[in-house]
């Protein structure tokens, strides 16, 4: 089938890397995947979507009905990730799947009823009222252990777009731990493999775990402490984002938490990711949903089971 994924920009963010990983899995299954992106500055020159068909168009071009735009009706299914793009597909004759990547921001809430609604965590599914949860998969071929970690921690990587809190910075300084700070970037796997453990939440924690590192769930929503084999499934329900305890620690409390570092957890974390967050399982879930949504749409709209044969615009 021909699948279009609509994104809001071409920056290296968690949602965009999720979309690339998903598209790779769908391609393996024989689907044709294109991207539609609203360009911001020169960011369309970034190469992480190299090899894909990518359409760069401003949302307002569709609102004001400018000519020579992408024909959305030529696709079999469209995947939306933000409600501000619903205007693009309001009148298309194609089934829409809306994916909510969280519940904190209003753009994750669809304003219209679509054929299917997916949440990336159980918490999101419950709050945003999605049809189903499909956890984010991790590219374990890219994120894998390349170096051993120390029995006693000497370095950590805080993967977060914002600033490092004074409490976290002071905690690591008091414990003699060298703290590095980074965000989403092409070589983040290499950075992870230079430290003993990862601090962050959501995708940051999962990628650190996949690299065989202990992961400390810490961020704006709170600190859930270290991921382990006993709490992982419960933390996963909230996307390992600090929602489980919502604890806010002072300097002394955070020092006590980090002192519980156990290097042996790194290997266990790798196994947890392989068992619960593989790209393959995410790809299987989306293919099942896409086939079901498209078949149901065809039956309800009498499309005759012959998929649309319109020519889509070719962009260089």
Image (cartoon, rainbow, N blue to C red):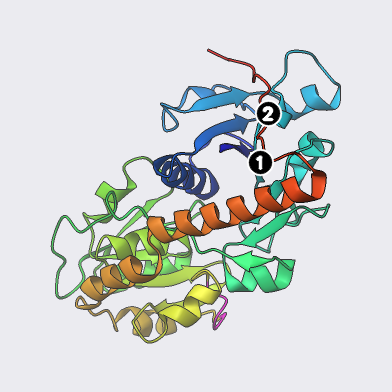
Q: Quadrant of residue 204?
A: bottom left
Q: Are marks 1 and 2 in contact (CB under 8 Å)?
A: no
From the image, give the main secondary structure of the stretch colored magenta. Answer: loop
Q: Is residue 173 above or below residue 298?
A: below
Looking at the rendered structure, the number of numbered marks drawn on it comes to 2
Where in the figure is residue 163, as x and y percent of width and height? 50, 54
Q: Where's residue 239, x and y in %?
A: 52, 68
> Badge 2: few (under 14), some or many (20 or more) residues near its Cα, within 10 Å?
many
Asked if residue 173 is among those painted magenta in the image, a careful observer would answer: no
Q: Which residue corresponds to mark 1? A: 78
Q: Residue at x 44, y 72 (%)?
A: 217
The residue pinned by badge 2 equals 74
**Can I make out residue 164 in this image?**
no
Mark 1 element type:
strand
Within the magenta stretch, is there residue 243?
A: yes
Q: Residue 186, how many percent across, how many down?
A: 36, 40
Q: Is residue 72 visible?
A: yes
Q: Is residue 64 left or right of residue 297?
A: right
**Local SS, label 2:** helix
**Residue range (magenta):** 242-246
Tell me how far mark 1 sits from mark 2, CA to CA: 10 Å
* Residue lying at 81% horizontally and 44% vertically, measured from the top left: 301
In the image, what residue occupies the spot 24% across and 71% down? 266
């Amino acid at each position: 089938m021909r699948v279009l994924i609509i994104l809001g920009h071409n920056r290296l963010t968690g949602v965009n890397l999720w979309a690339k990983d998903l598209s790779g899995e769908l391609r393996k299954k024989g689907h044709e995947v294109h991207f539609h992106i609203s360009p911001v500055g020169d960011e369309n020159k970034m190469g992480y979507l190299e090899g894909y068909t990518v359409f760069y168009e401003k949302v307002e071009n569709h609102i004001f009905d400018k000519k020579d735009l992408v024909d959305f009706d030529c696709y079999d299914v469209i995947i939306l990730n933000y409600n501000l793009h619903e205007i693009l597909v309001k009148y298309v004759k194609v089934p829409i799947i809306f994916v909510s990547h969280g519940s904190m921001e209003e753009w994750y809430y669809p304003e219209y009823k679509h054929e299917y609604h997916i949440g990336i965590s159980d918490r999101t599914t419950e709050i945003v009222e999605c049809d189903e949860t499909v956890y984010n998969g991790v590219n374990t071929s890219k994120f894998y252990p390349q170096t051993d970690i120390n029995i006693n921690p000497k370095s950590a990587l805080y993967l977060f777009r914002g600033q490092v809190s004074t409490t976290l910075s002071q905690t690591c300084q008091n414990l003699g731990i060298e703290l590095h700070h980074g965000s989403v970037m092409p070589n983040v796997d290499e950075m992870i493999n230079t430290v003993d453990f990862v601090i962050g939440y959501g995708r940051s924690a999962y990628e650190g775990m996949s690299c065989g590192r202990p992961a400390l769930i810490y961020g704006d929503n709170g600190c859930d402490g270290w991921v382990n084999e006993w709490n992982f499934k419960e933390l996963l329900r909230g996307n390992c984002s600090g929602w489980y305890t919502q604890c806010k620690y002072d300097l002394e409390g955070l020092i006590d938490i980090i002192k519980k570092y156990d290097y042996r957890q790194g290997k266990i974390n790798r196994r947890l990711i392989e068992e619960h967050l593989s790209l393959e399982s995410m790809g299987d879930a989306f293919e099942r949903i896409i086939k079901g949504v498209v078949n149901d749409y065809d039956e309800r709209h009498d499309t005759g089971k012959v998929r649309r044969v319109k020519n889509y615009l070719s962009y260089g």
